[in-house]
Amino acid sequence: ETGVTQTPRHLVMGMTNKKSLKCEQHLGHNAMYWYKQSAKKPLELMFVYNFKEQTENNSVPSRFSPECPNSSHLFLHLHTLQPEDSALYLCASSQRLAGGYEQYFGPGTRLTVT
Amino acid sequence: GDSVVQTEGQVLPSEGDSLIVNCSYETTQYPSLFWYVQYPGEGPQLHLKAMKANDKGRNKGFEAMYRKETTSFHLEKDSVQESDSAVYFCALSDGGSTLGRLYFGRGTQLTVWP
């Protein structure tokens, strides 16, 4: 595997379910990010991790719970979601958590909440 | 705060037409500027970048000049191809920041007619 991978690619879940999204980066990067991409809205930064420590939580509801066990893996645990949480969830990584470094994105998980 | 405004909605040139997608930014710092491209079913990927004023980013016939005096980073191409069809995002990263945050525009859907 190369780059940033995400699983699953598609997920349908009910409002009472609990599920997790997984991201893995094979680039040796130190910073990882979760974004939400909804139709007609700009990319929304959700969480930032640097050397597996959370550095930013962008006012995300507690029904989204991130986990970063090491610099290569990032999870997003989901529970009691709402239909408006349906979106494409993108994981990204960058070499360093500093300005000027580009971010590398995974293909995303298309989430549908029913 | 930092922000990016770009041509919104769809741009519908024919193959062989020239293209300009506008991008203007606001920041009090020293940004690096990026264009990302997103194809259907994929995450955004870096298309080109410019790290400082008067730098020109280039990729696959596209160019963008980092103009500090007009705070702009317009994406240009002399002759577009059908394969260029995608969503393009302008983004900035605060070069003096330790947060590594990318500020994205809302995206421009480029659809090139054959």
Image (cartoon, helix red, strand yellow):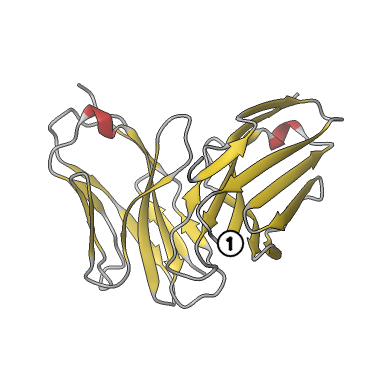
Q: Foreground residue, A103 or B92? A: A103
Question: Residue at left 18%, top 35%?
Answer: B80
Q: Is residue B12 above or below residue B8?
A: above
Tell me where residue A21 appears, x and y as whole percent: 70, 39
Where is residue A39 drawn, in percent x and y? 54, 35
**Residue found 39% across the figure and 76% down from its top:** B30
In the picture as drawn, the residue positioned furthest to the front comes out as A1
Q: At 79% across and 36% down in the image, what residue appears?
A: A81
Q: Which residue sits at x=58%, y=61%?
A: A31
Question: Quadrant of the rendered structure where residue B18 is?
Answer: top left
Q: Is residue B54 left or right of residue A79?
A: left
Q: Which quarter of the rendered picture does the C terminus of chain A lie within?
A: top right
Q: Chain of mark 1?
A: A
Q: Residues within 10 Å of mark 1 (few under 14, many from 20)?
A: many
- Number of marks in the image? 1
Judge left or right: residue B19 versus residue A80.
Answer: left
Q: Nearer the viewer, residue A95 or A61?
A: A95
Residue B69, given in percent of the width and then of the height, sits at 25, 73
Tell me the amino acid under the disc marked 1.
Ala
Q: In the orientation shown, which residue stands out farthest toward the top?
A: B114
The correct choice, above or below, for A54 with respect to A43 in the image is below
Residue occupied by mark 1: A31
Q: Is residue B5 left or right of residue A87?
A: left
| Of the pair A87 and A110, the residue shown nearer to us | A110
* Left or right: where A83 falls relative to B7: right
Residue A32 position within the rendered picture, expressed as x and y whole percent measured from the top left: 60, 56
Q: Secondary structure at mark 1?
A: strand
